[in-house]
């Protein structure tokens, strides 16, 4: 195909969203709508992708700051034709494909089919679709595949409003026909320059405008309200689940939420009510129990995570086991074969190979070596009220239950810490450390009870 430039229109305010956030930054399955459109556009390998911004431009442009697109500003929102003309200075010699930043369900295969249809004749081509209720959309009047005109609803006659074939807005314009846009006027009830009026200009010049009819309306219509956003979430959610199932992932129920960018290996099983989002990568043969929340984490193969676990920004190596009701916070790394038990919190710490933190413990700002056993109720006291301090526990240490380790402190290899100790000093290798007050018995003491009448 001839070189292609893609222009994504993203200047609208989206008043029906009732939000200060620019419409194209509202999320579908955890990702801004415009990201899906940019990704689909990139799949066509165009010469350039141009995004026309307007309302909330600073936020939109800050989001699109990775260099993959060129942003231009439509200072005054005077209509879609005006928005497209705004991009003219950045266009090359290729044909122009127009997409919309609020159409997140568009798929690469659909755009490829659209371009193939266009290549047969190389005429201005609009993508159309049929809807049950066309209210609010421009109606397309056709003879065969030829578009006679497209009427915006506000300007349509009662008879034209009965037409169910509507304009999706997606179109492709041959580079040599781009100047037709300059001949569009704003003689309509909104006083805007409609891109659809290029049909009238083209026909007046003896040119042909074609309709490419797409059969799945939900894929190619814009998101204009919170209700439509929710429906888009449902569709995208099912797409995501089906993609993972095709790749060998088992879901025990559809009631799971998997973000669009999540990667999951084959033979992994995910129980109901899980919420997995962000840049999360899950390996093969992983089991994730019910009601688990995972954000921006890396989980290697053969890991078992029980129910009601919350983790964010962590890495679990192979063969790790995580018990129920645990919380793993940012920068926690759990090494191969280690076990995190029930009601355990780990934050900014490394738990070494085959080590165990099995019950009711808090591990913060710590480095734990290999083969360490942390008893129930143990905490690393990492915060002195001003600064965080580090605890180092070397290999093969045994820490008894209900121990407090007051950082900064190092516990040497093969050491044993007696249950109920408060450790405030470094512990040498291969010693038993005990820190307890002497037990006293006071004779003749009896707890007095008051009778309440």
Image (cartoon, rainbow, N blue to C red):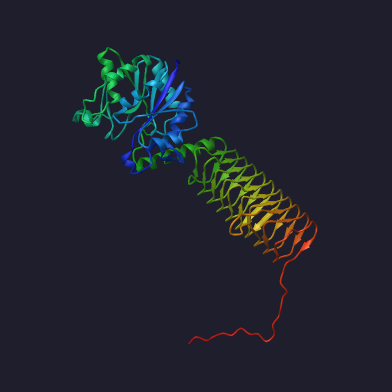
Measured as percent of width and height from the top left, residue 306 is found at 59, 52
What is the tally of numbered marks visible in this picture? 0
Residue 272 lies, with reference to residue 451, above or below; the image says above
Front-most of residues 205 and 50 = 50
Measured as percent of width and height from the top left, residue 156 is found at 21, 29
Asked where in the image residue 202 lies, by quadrant, the reply is top left
Measured as percent of width and height from the top left, residue 150 is found at 27, 24
Front-most of residues 315 and 115 = 315
* Residue at the right extreme of this rendering: 430
Residue 87 lies, with reference to residue 287, above or below; the image says above
Q: Residue at x 61, y 53 (%)?
A: 346
Asked where in the image residue 386 lies, by quadrant, the reply is bottom right
**Residue 147 is at least partly visible in this image:** no
Measured as percent of width and height from the top left, residue 19 is found at 35, 44
37 left or right of 207?
Answer: right
Q: Quadrant of the N terminus?
A: top left
* Residue at the left extreme of this rendering: 158
* Residue at the front extreme of this rendering: 386
**Residue 231 is at least partly visible in this image:** yes
Front-most of residues 7 and 164 = 7
Front-most of residues 88 and 174 = 88
Q: Residue at x 19, y 29 (%)?
A: 157
Asked where in the image residue 440 lies, by quadrant, the reply is bottom right
123 left or right of 415?
Answer: left
């Amino acid at each position: 195909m001839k070189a292609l430039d893609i222009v994504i229109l993203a200047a609208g305010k989206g008043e029906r969203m009732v939000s200060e956030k620019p419409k194209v930054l509202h999320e579908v399955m955890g990702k801004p709508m415009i990201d899906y459109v940019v990704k689909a556009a990139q799949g066509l390998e165009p010469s350039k992708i141009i995004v026309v911004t307007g309302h909330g431009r600073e936020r939109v442009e800050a989001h699109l700051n990775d260099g993959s697109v060129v942003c231009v500003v439509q200072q005054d929102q005077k209509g879609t034709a005006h928005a497209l003309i705004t991009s003219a200075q950045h266009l090359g010699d290729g044909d122009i494909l127009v997409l919309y930043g609020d159409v997140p369900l568009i798929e690469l295969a659909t755009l490829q089919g659209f371009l193939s249809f266009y290549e047969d004749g190389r005429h201005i081509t609009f993508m159309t679709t049929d809807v049950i209720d066309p209210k609010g959309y421009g109606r397309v009047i056709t003879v065969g595949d030829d578009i006679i005109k497209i009427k915006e609803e506000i300007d349509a006659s009662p008879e034209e409003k009965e037409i169910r074939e509507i304009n999706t807005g997606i179109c492709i314009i041959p580079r040599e026909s781009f100047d037709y846009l300059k001949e569009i006027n704003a003689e309509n009830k909104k006083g805007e320059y409609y891109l659809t009026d290029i049909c009238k200009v083209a026909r007046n010049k003896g040119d042909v405008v074609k309709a490419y009819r797409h059969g799945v309306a939900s894929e190619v219509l814009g998101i204009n309200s919170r209700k439509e956003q929710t429906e888009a979430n449902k569709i995208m959610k099912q797409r995501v689940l089906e993609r993972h199932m095709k790749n060998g992932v088992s879901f025990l129920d559809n009631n799971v939420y998997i973000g669009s960018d999540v990667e999951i290996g084959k033979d992994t099983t995910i129980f109901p009510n899980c919420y997995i989002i962000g840049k999360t990568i899950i390996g093969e043969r992983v089991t994730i129990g019910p009601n688990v929340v995972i954000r921006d984490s890396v989980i290697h193969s053969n890991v078992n995570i029980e129910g009601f676990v919350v983790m964010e920004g962590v890495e679990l190596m192979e063969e790790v086991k995580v018990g129920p009701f645990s919380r793993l916070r940012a920068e926690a790394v759990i090494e191969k074969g280690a076990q995190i038990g029930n009601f355990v919190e780990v934050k900014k710490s490394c738990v070494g190979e085959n080590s165990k933190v099995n019950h009711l413990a808090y591990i913060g700002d710590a480095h734990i070596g290999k083969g360490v056993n942390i008893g129930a109720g143990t905490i690393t006291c990492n915060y002195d009220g001003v600064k965080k301090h580090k605890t180092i526990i070397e290999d093969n240490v045994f820490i008894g239950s209900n121990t407090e380790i007051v950082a900064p402190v190092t516990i040497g290899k093969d050491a044993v810490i007696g249950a109920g100790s408060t450790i405030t000093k470094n512990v040498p290798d291969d010693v038993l450390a005990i820190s307890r007050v002497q037990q006293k018995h006071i004779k003749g003491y009896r707890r007095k009870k008051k009778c309440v009448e």
